[in-house]
Image (cartoon, rainbow, N blue to C red):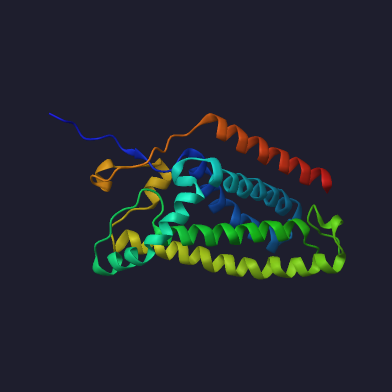
Amino acid sequence: MTGEAPPRLIWDWTVRLFHWLIVLIIPLMWWTAEEGHMDWHRRLGMTMFALILFRLIWGLIGTWTARFGPMIRRLGSLGDYIRDLRSGAHKPAFGHGPLGVLSVFALLLGISIQVSTGLFAVDVDGLESGPLAVLISFDFGRELAEIHELNFNILSGLILLHIAAILFYRFRLRDHLVKPMVTGKRAAADFGSQELPENRMRLVPLLIAVILTAASVYAVLEAG
């Protein structure tokens, strides 16, 4: 008698850690900026810089579900995916579905713009600045500060849309997306008989991503 197949790894621990740290840090960064705790705001900003840089590198050399290549290829089935949603024939994806890919790319872009503008931003009196503001003019730093503020509003909208999508999948489609982002796994039965790609964590790519991230953070701190 054949036993039930073991759960499949969907999200490796680095993807899950990145996700939940972002969930924690973004509201903390908003609060520190609003309350004027700029020393902590800068520390959190550098943490965010390290996180987003690692995630971008991991999107090139990480596990299958973390990589951008498979995500981009999945966009080719966006039309069919939307038609399936409308007809109630939703099937869980191994990783991000096409709409999830669009959400991930939008959020990564929004966070990247927020971090990069924050590195160079200068406040109105020039007293509070990002670590790389010394490399640009005061006027350009002010322009980036305005983009930084505007982009946060856009990013907040994207986050609310992301939460709304999670709730839609949970209560309309009965697809619990949060649990796999906590445990990293889904039941093999969720994917039926489809052949699934290897999604194993490898040490060498992880070390490369960590070293490149650490070197980049060090370079920014030294330049500032």
Q: Residue at x 56, y 66 (%)?
A: 156
Task: Point out residue 56 in the picture as x, y percentages from the top left corner.
Answer: 59, 48
Task: Point out residue 222 in the picture as x, y percentages from the top left corner.
Answer: 82, 43
Q: Is residue 89 left or right of residue 14?
A: left
Q: Is residue 84 left or right of residue 66?
A: left
Depth check, front residue: 87 or 46:
87
Depth check, front residue: 127 or 73:
73
Q: Across the whole image, how many numbered discs are drawn on residues? A: 0
Q: Residue at x 46, y 62 (%)?
A: 162
Q: Quadrant of residue 163?
A: bottom left
Say if 53 sits above or below 173 in the image: above
Q: Residue at x 49, y 66 (%)?
A: 160
Q: Is residue 93 left or right of residue 222?
A: left
Say if 56 sits above or below 109 in the image: above
Which quadrant of the figure contains the N terminus? top left
Say if 75 sits above or below 198 in the image: below
Task: Point out residue 62 in the picture as x, y percentages from the top left corner.
Answer: 52, 40
Quick check: can you spot residue 166? no
Q: Quadrant of residue 109?
A: bottom right
Q: Is residue 221 left or right of residue 193?
A: right
Q: Residue at x 42, y 44 (%)?
A: 182
Quick check: can you spot residue 177? yes
Residue at the left extreme? 1
Task: Point out residue 221 in the picture as x, y percentages from the top left corner.
Answer: 79, 44
Depth check, front residue: 27 or 184:
184
